[in-house]
Amino acid sequence: MKLPYCLFILVLFACSCKKTNPPVTIITDTTTIDTSANVYLPMRGADLTIFPIIESWSGLYFDSFSAKGCLPILQEHGCNIIRVGIWNHPADAHLDLGHILFLCQRINQAGMQIMLDFHYSDTAADAAHQALPAAWTGLGVEVLKDSVKAYTQYILNALKAQNTMPAIVQVGNDIDNGMLWPAGKVTGTADANWNNLAALVKSGIDGVHAVDENMPIMLHYGQTADAQSFFNSMQQHGVPFDIMGVSYYPWSDTKDLDVLQQRLNQLATSFNKQVFIAETAYPFSLAGYDNTPNIVTDNSQILYPIYQANQRGQLLFLQQLKKVIAAIPNNLGLGFSYQHPEWVPYRGRDATDCSPWENIALFDFYGMAQPGMNVYRP
């Protein structure tokens, strides 16, 4: 039985009375937010890769004090595509292929499209972690190429069999320094190993096109600085791609939105391809709720004081980011995906290995939808 939101809050409060955590204060200055300031973008997304884990613990999400569930809330606000990461053999069973297939069915039923993100690892792959899956340990490049193609084709055939084919496929995640290390590891664009990396990425693309020859391919670089060089190298090595995905987090990238605009414009005009902000996020608070250290805890990490770490600042930042994407020349700004909007402190206040993201989500500490959700309005 689902508890009414007010009763749920009382239960949480009663359970937390014995905790040692300091009180949490969230600034909720929303009185002057102009939600009509939105601009249109074709793709307005969210990455829900770890949602099955969170939902297995609670899955309680609210909008206007009504428990509706995470997917319906996102869809009702205007989110139209969900980015789903796929890992080879994840340690947590909630991220295995069966759970991912079920999640894709639910996304499809909710009326949203799917962006499938191949990590090609047993864990989350990023610029600092691109481990070979255990099953591929010790394989040479030629065998790896076959494995990548066959695995990619297998996953997409499973999605096709249940009529949940993605709208876009991302081959590799955060492949700034390559993927499937050490075979596909690169350091800089002059690295001799680029031939291997390009061959592995092409194999993934071949696997996609073996199932759907018209499927749009996105490559993903984990920042906006140096993205130009990365995509240049991909093109020079004959890697075909349709969409340039980049991440934009203010705490690890430029804090000047004019510089961001210049970089995105240059990408689009240099390659005449669509640009997609594959990952972004912004805090609604600098406070935390659980005992897991958070990623963003200080004003120096964000675009302060223009966009403050409160509910109003979160929405205003996201609205401005939409304007930046929409201003990319020749309508080549495809859209964005908010990273882990659902990553609330789902295991309670004492958890030390739960959410480093609860102050950056689009739901507050108690699962209530934030004003930042309005960024999805078309």
Image: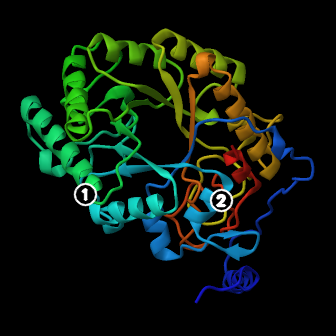
Q: Quadrant of residue 136?
A: top left
- Is residue 147 visible in the rendered image? The answer is yes
Q: Residue placed at 71% from the left, 75% from the top? A: 66
Percent of width and height locating residue 320: 74, 33
Given the current orientation, which residue lies at the most extreme bottom position? Answer: 1
Of the pair 168 and 63, the residue shown nearer to us: 168
Amino acid bearing label 1: Ala
Q: Residues within 10 Å of mark 2 (few under 14, many from 20)?
A: few
Give the residue at x 33% y 56%.
163
Residue 303 % position (x, y) = 74, 33
Q: Residue furthest right?
A: 31
| Label 1 environment density (alpha carbons within 10 Å; few <14, some 14–19, many ≥20) | few
Q: CA distance from mark 1 to mark 2?
A: 28 Å
Q: Secondary structure at mark 1?
A: helix
The residue singled out by tag 2 in the image is: 76
Residue at the spot of label 1: 161
**Front position in the image: 301 or 220:** 220
Quarter of the figure that contains the C terminus: top right
Q: Looking at the image, is 371 positioned above or below residue 214?
A: below
